[in-house]
Image (cartoon, coloured by chain):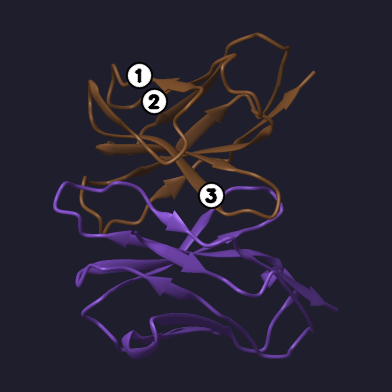
Chain colours: A purple, B brown
Amino acid sequence: AQKVTQAQTEISVVEKEDVTLDCVYETRDTTYYLFWYKQPPSGELVFLIRRNSFDEQNEISGRYSWNFQKSTSSFNFTITASQVVDSAVYFCALSEDSGGGADGLTFGKGTHLIIQP
Amino acid sequence: DGGITQSPKYLFRKEGQNVTLSCEQNLNHDAMYWYRQDPGQGLRLIYYSQIVNDFQKGDIAEGYSVSREKKESFPLTVTSAQKNPTAFYLCASSTSREEDQPQHFGDGTRLSIL
């Protein structure tokens, strides 16, 4: 069965510091998809990025970057020069290619990121 | 604007009562999902539907029921059999039935027991 582990329950940093959120996953499938979502205090989940298991290229989007390493089953998320608006709960999620269509996402428990001014 | 609308935002249930949470999307998405979120926990899948008139149980379906009579609507009923219903409920949809598509989420419904 698939599993996603976000070991960091809460991280607190001062604004402008860099911060990395860890995500480790378990799956038996060779084809799978990884996602990161942001949940601000208002509650809705905002999609940030998707990565498939065949694409190990790192990705950068502004101050955000993602490091996908199949060898360690990790998909870590780094925020550079953090800002107060980055404060939120961040979820890593996994979707397997079961052959029967989208069965829903398996989520980690989330990391609560607090950016102090 | 296109999106997912969940209502109500807050809902209170009395003991022994069934309540229904609404989820409507105007994104023309095929697949829809219901998740439950408890404090300090990730989201757990309750039910999902890949096509109209068809749905499957997720990891924690006991005490819940759904219907999918229209493509844009996927209501969730929390029955009296659900002994611990207090939680934040999120509805999501995706553009296809394939696993690689990101899910888009509504703003959620917070359910509490009176």
Asked if both marks, 2 and 1, belong to the same chain, the answer given is yes
Between A15 and B65, the residue placed more toward the observer is B65
Q: Position of residue A107 (x, y in %)?
A: 48, 58
Chain for numbered disc 1: B
Q: Which of the 4 quarters of the picture holds residue A109?
A: bottom right
At x 23%, y 25%, the residue is: B52
Q: Are marks 2 and 1 in contact (CB under 8 Å)?
A: yes
Q: Position of residue A96 (x, y in %)?
A: 27, 60
Label 1 sits on a secondary structure element that is: loop
Q: Are marks 2 and 3 in contact (CB under 8 Å)?
A: no
User: Measured along the vertical axis of the image, is residue B42 above or below residue B44?
Assistant: below
**Which part of the image, by quadrant, shows the C terminus of chain B?**
top right
Q: Which of the 4 quarters of the picture holds residue A50?
A: bottom left
> Is residue A82 found left or right of B47 in the rendered image?
right
Spatial CA distance of label 2 from label 1 is 6 Å
> Is residue B5 found left or right of B95 in the rendered image?
right
Instruction: Return the residue at label 1.
Output: B67
